[in-house]
Amino acid sequence: MKIAQVTSLIESVPPLHNNGLEFIVHFLTDGLVDKGHEVTLFATGDSQTDAELTAVWPKAASRDVLAKDISRGIFSKWSHEAAFLRADEFDIIHTHDFYGMSWCLMPAPLVMTVHCPAGDYEEYKKKFPVNYWPYFKQLENKLKNGYTVFVSESQRSHFPSGRHHYVVHNGVPVEDFSFSDKPEDYFVFLGYISENKGPHLAIQAADAAGVKLKIAGNRFLNKAFFNEQMKPFLRAGRIEYLGSLGYEEKIRLLRGAKAVFVPIQWKEPFGLVMIEAMSCGTPVIALNRASVPEIVVDGKTGFICNSVDEMAEAAKNIDKISRLECRRHVEKNFSVGKMVEGYEKVYERIISDFQRRFKK
């Protein structure tokens, strides 16, 4: 197949730091190339890929001081227009940016993977008076009728149901995440420092269990939360904040941990850290929300909990979890190969449907 992959230009592919979406685009794009597909990536000039790269902007807009006055929507428009103008060269165009969703008729079908949090659409709509709601019908029709991929069943359940909706779980290159069956004496929280991710709850669970906790993630967008809910509880040698980590640093941290805490407080679309941790053999201790039950096998690859107290108890019993079982679970269900196979099937179904509907 001839496939176009399209991003928003806000971040490079792969990202410099922790943006999970661009890592997925990177893994998927190179995985499709490995399977023999002809892939063109519409992205920033500082992206690295095995596919043909069409650079729409010289570097990641989020790190470009010359781009500070240009809105995200404009960058999305530029990258998608670049792909749409070459639509007759592709069998399918795959966008990973909600802003790029389109229902226009082109020579090739457009499929969108929704990476954004579930529930965003309904919450956004509620910001407007009820008499405005009928005007959202066009967007609802796009959500219902467009070719759409969700990264979890949980995420899909919060959007208007549609005939051409699919679920493909994210995957990671398991070979990048070296396995360890002899962890060190600490637990981990890894993710953006925000109330939605629950790092303050990880601190509470670690304190209650009497275990060491290492916290890593970007705090700069949530300075007030960090200063009020986390900083007072940090203690050298017990509860430590490491800052934002690069890809290799992240892997080393996860590999050495006894378990990773995932106390999410929102409708997390997927939760990449869970499969990254399990790839290393590191179990997951998570609250029972959103996509967690789709990713973690309770009692086998970690513990699914309903409270901070249960998380603390799980930490005390983490040695009951087989680290090898964690690794095998990801190899079987969440590898890049598994994700690529899922998208290949989706592409084939969409191309067939598109030709039947519009190529008569």
Image: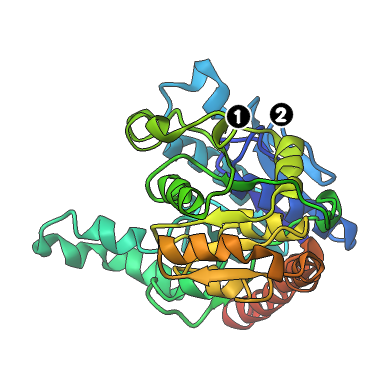
> Which residue reaches farthest top?
66
Horizontal and vertical percent position of residue 157? 43, 76
Nearer to us in this view, 28 or 108: 28
Say which residue appears at 75% left-offset and 52% top-offset: 27
Position of 9 compared to 156: left or right?
Answer: right
Residue found 53% across the figure and 28% down from its top: 62
Q: Which secondary structure, mark 1?
A: loop
Q: Which numbered tag is attached to residue 46?
A: 2
Vertical relation: 63 (above or below) 295: above
Q: Position of residue 119 (x, y in %)?
A: 35, 63
Q: First in sequence: mark 1 or mark 2?
A: 2
Contact flag, marks 1 and 2 (Cβ < 8 Å): yes
Q: Which residue is mark 1?
A: 60
Q: Is residue 351 visible?
A: yes
Percent of width and height locating residue 54: 72, 38
Asked whether 143 or 267 is in front, the reply is 267
Left or right, 307 with respect to 339, comes to left
Amino acid found under the numbered disc labelled 2: Asp
Vertical placement of residue 156 versus 11, above or below: below
Q: How many marks?
A: 2
The secondary structure type at the circle numbered 2 is: loop
Neighbour class for label 1 at 10 Å: few (<14), some, many (≥20)?
many
Q: CA distance from mark 1 to mark 2?
A: 7 Å
Quadrant of res 349: bottom right
